[in-house]
Amino acid sequence: MTWLDLPPDGLFGIDNLPYGVFSPSGDAPRVGVRVGEQVLDLAAALDDPVFARPSLNAFMTQGRTRWTQVRARVTELLTDGRHQRATAPHLHRLEDMRLHLPFEVADYVDFYASEHHATNLGRLFRPGGDPLTPNWKHLPIGYHGRAGTVVVSGTPVVRPRGQRKSPEAASPEFGPTRRLDIEAEVGFVVGTGSRQGEPVSVADFRERVFGVCLVNDWSARDLQAWEYVPLGPFLGKSFATSVSAWVVPLDALDAAWTSPPARDPEPLPYLADTGKQGLDLNLDVHLNGHLISSPPFASMYWTGAQMLAHMTANGASTRTGDLYASGTVSGPHADECGSLIELTAGGAKPLVLPDGSTRAFLEDGDEVTVNGTAPGPRGGRIGLGEVTGRIRPALGDANGRILPAGHES
Ligand code: CA
């Protein structure tokens, strides 16, 4: 129960309480907790300066015991009527607030943990060969991305330019991508880091990871196809990665744990796990307001705990604010794919939207929104928020020349 007036089936009730960074107009950004359509100013409500900062990092550094204490205290403030008078003045209407990147991204790693996605992409990028590479079922494949271009939901995405070469062309050309795509993913936010030389075990996941967010790993498929051999993704993905404004703490996801798919062959001992190590999160992908896909995170082959264990297995350190994303979430069915390249068979079968328009890849002005939910503790659902972005035209002219300021085409 709560003294707040919340809808009974709302996605941001008292069981959720995700963290973000907000600012009233003209004021400095600070940490808040979302409840319903409001945000609680934690620095004011808890009288704690660790929340009067423009990121969650200082709070996350304090560790799991403290995260659990703060969540319990916030729950108490919002449920016990004795706190209503003191707490209510620190609640602000979300619609009046600006939302910021919730944490300072330290390092960014992106995995490739969906067997369905990896199989679909393997068929498109390497036709005729085995869709899964020989290493795929032995380790969670990943690459290091660009932390500095992670942006908060709502930030426009400028169509990237780069080298692209069609298979029939003799040489590459330079220009705006013609195959701009999305990748609907789930991101894990590292709360407490680990020292160099000290691998994090699968069992340490809950001690280290603060929570999850939604991720859209924007991808330029033509740039990617030309550049990715042999070192993997580079400029086709580093121009922008969008994350949701709310980080849902692991403490809110107790009802969401589920068994991952059976692994065959058994992973090596450092990746071994048992029981409910996967997360039953449901994503929805919307293009210009139309639902185009519903990827199920429960179908992911590798779990967040295995990804963390693998990315530190060599002794690599982690830091507060590290973001590692799951890779595109795609389920076994045609309407469960988390990228356009899968939904349109590499562009060969464009989507037909309800307004009659067709899309193989994204056009300028298109808006993509990924939202998600998880099972809540009392049979309901909690919201993961949304990650949205609209495509802006590429800079410069069609040949890739950057024009002087004020002369954009
Ligand atoms: Ca990705």
Image (cartoon, helix red, strand yellow):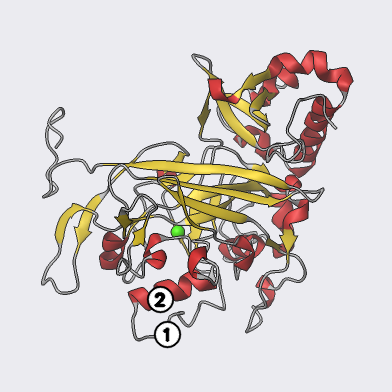
**Which is more toward the observer, 216 or 375?**
375
**Residue 235 appears in view:** no
**Amino acid found under the numbered disc labelled 2:** Gly
Query: Would you say 387 lies left or right of 398 here?
Result: right
Query: Would you say 66 lies left or right of 166 here?
Result: right
| Residue 382, quarter of picture | top right
* Residue behind mark 2: 122
SS for callout 2:
helix
Q: x%, y% of residue 135?
A: 50, 79
Q: Is residue 26 above or below residue 149?
A: above
* Residue behind mark 1: 130
| Residue 86, quarter of picture | top right
User: Counting residues from the N terminus, which is met first, the one under dot 2 or under dot 1?
Assistant: 2
SS for callout 1:
loop
**Which is more toward the observer, 314 or 265?**
265
Q: Residue at x 57, y 66 (%)?
A: 314
Q: How much space separates mark 2 and mark 1, taking CA atoms?
A: 7 Å
**Residue 56 appears in view:** yes
Q: Quadrant of ligand 1?
A: bottom left
Q: x%, y% of residue 272?
A: 70, 73
Q: Residue at x 39, y 78 (%)?
A: 123
Q: Residue at x 56, y 35 (%)?
A: 102
Q: x%, y% of residue 110?
A: 49, 58
Q: Are marks 2 and 1 in contact (CB under 8 Å)?
A: yes
Quarter of the image containing the N terminus?
top right
Report if the beta carbon of the residue with label 2 is closer than 8 angstroms to ligand 1: no
**Amino acid found under the numbered disc labelled 1:** Asp
Query: Would you say 174 lies left or right of 209 here?
Result: left
Report if the beta carbon of the residue with label 1 is closer than 8 angstroms to ligand 1: no
Quarter of the image containing the C terminus?
top left
Q: Residues within 10 Å of mark 1 (few under 14, many from 20)?
A: few
Q: x%, y% of residue 214?
A: 55, 48
